Amino acid sequence: MNIAMIGTGYVGLVSGVCFAEFGFQVTCVDKDPEIVERLSREETTIFEPGLELLLSRNVRESRLTFTTDIAEAVGSADVVFIAVGTPSRRGGGEADLSYIMAAADEIAAVMQPGQVIAIKSTVEVGTNEVVRDRIRAARPGVPFSMVSNPEFLREGSAIEDFMRPDRVVIGAEDDHGREIMRRVYRPLFLRDTPMVSTTLANAELIKYASNAFLAVKVSFINQIADLCEKVGGDVQDVARAMGMDGRIGAKFLHPGPGFGGSCFPKDTRALASIGRKRGARQLLVEAAENLNEARKLDMAERILTQLRAEGGDTVAILGVAFKPNTDDIREAPSLTIIGKLIEAGVKVKAHDPEAMEAARKLLPGVDWCRSAWDAVSGAHVTVLVTEWNAYRALDLRRVSALMAGTTMIDMRNVYSPAEIAGTGLSYHSIGRASIQ
Ligand code: NAD
C-alpha cells in the first residue's frame, strides 16, 4: 500500500509518520522546500512528543520520504490524503478552502485511474463533493474514489491519538473507497477501533459538530467558574462531581483563560457561519465563540486590576502555547492577553518551554526569558497561562522571593490553597476564592 500525504503540518506529518510506522510506504509532500529539506534529514519541524523517534526510524528504514514534487508522490499512490490548512477566511467566519482547491487541482493533473482521494483537513459540509466534481471536470473519464476522513488528533498527544483514536470516520461514495480506507486503518482495527462508515456530508459534519461541542463545554464550565467566584463556590469540586456523571464526562470541564489553538476557534466560527448561511443558526456555538473572545479580554483585565493593586508595572507570563506539549501558538489566549498588557504599557516578561520561537514573531515588545525563574524575577504579578509540567511544581517560596510584588494568578488552577499557604503570595485562580 502506497500513501501520498499532501501537506506536512501538524496533521499531515503525524499521519504520514504513523502510517509509515504501520509499515506502509509513505511520501509526504509540502510546498515549503524548507520543511521538506529539514524533514528529509530527520529534523522535526514541529514539537510533538514522540515524533522525533518515529520520524528518524521510518526515514532510515526507507518507508517515509519527503518531496515538494506532487507528481512523484501521487504517481504510485493507492491513497492520496489532503492535509493542507483550512484557516478562517479574513474578515469572515468561514473556512478558507483555497489551499484545498489548489491541492485538488495539483492532484488532478497527475493522478492515476483507480486512486482514492481522501480529505483529512477539516472542511465545510459540501466541500468533498465540490472537490470531487472539480477533479472530475479536470480529468473527465479518469475513475477515482472520493473519501472524507476527518482527523481528530490533538496537538500535544498527536501520535498517541493517531495510534489509539476513539473512532475512525470514513465518508465514502463507493465500495472501492471504503475498502482501501479499511486497509489503510487495518492496523487500528486489530485493536477494535470502531470505524464509522457514512456519507461524505456526514463525515464533514461529524468533525465540526465534535469540535464545536467541546468548545461549548469549555465555555460552559468557564461560565460556571464565573458564578462560583461570585457566590463563593469552588469550580474544581463542581466540575469533578459533574464529570463523574457518565452522561457528562470529565473531559473538557477545565476552566481557564478560554480555548485557543488552530482548531476550536476557527471550527466554531466556521460552523456558526455555515449555520447562518444555510438557515440553521447555531446559537449555542455562536454564544461559545462570543464568550471565548470576551473571556480572553476579561483575563487581561484581571491582570491589570492586580497590577494596579500592586502599584507595579511588570508581569511575568508562564506559558504562551495554547496548551502544554506543543509549540503551536495559533489563536492562543496568551496572544490576546499579552497584546492587551503591552497596549496598556505593561512590561511583560515571558517564558514557554517550546513556543517562544513562534511567539517572538507575533509579540514584539515582550522580554523572552530563559527560564521561569528569569521571568518571575522582578515581576509584580506572575500569571500561569499554560499548564506545562515544568510549572506544576514550582517552588512557590522561591517565586515569591524573586518577585518584586506578591500576586500570582493561576489561570489553570494548578495549585491548591494548601500549597500557597506560607509562601507569602496572594493567589488568584479561576472559579475559586482568592487567598490574600
Ligand atoms: P498546518 O498549517 O500545520 O499544515 C499545513 C501544511 O500544508 C503546511 O506545511 C503547508 O505548507 C502545506 N500546504 C499547503 N498547501 C499545499 C499544497 N498545495 N501542497 C503541499 N503542501 C501544501 O495545518 P494543520 O494544523 O496540520 O491542519 C491541517 C488540517 O487538519 C486543517 O484543516 C485542520 O483544521 C485539520 N486538523 C488539525 C488538527 C490540529 O491539531 N492541528 C487536528 C485535526 C484536524
Image: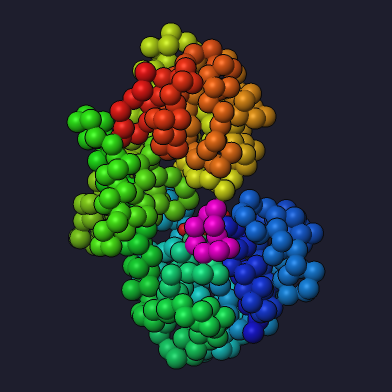
**Nearer the observer, 186 or 436:** 436
Which image quadrant for residue 427?
Answer: top left
Relative to 10, is 392 above or below? above
Give the image location of residue 170, x and y in percent. 43, 78
Give the image location of residue 98, x and y in percent. 49, 59
Q: Is residue 170 left or right of residue 143?
A: left
The answer to whether residue 335 is magenta is no
Q: Quadrant of the N terminus?
A: bottom right
Relative to 168, is 287 above or below? above
Give the image location of residue 135, x and y in percent. 50, 77
Give the image location of residue 127, x and y in percent. 40, 69
Which image quadrant for residue 372?
Answer: top right
Instruction: Specify the segment rendered in magenta.
Output: 153-161
**Nearer the observer, 235 or 360:** 235
Q: Is residue 102 left or right of residue 58?
A: left
Residue found 73% across the figure and 70% down from its top: 58
Q: Residue furthest top?
A: 311
Q: Is residue 307 left or right of residue 363?
A: left
Q: Quadrant of the C terminus?
A: top left
**Nearer the observer, 41 or 251:** 251
Which image quadrant for residue 19?
Answer: bottom right
Work out whether residue 113 can be spotted.
yes
Residue found 80% across the figure and 69% down from its top: 60
Relative to 78, is 329 above or below? above
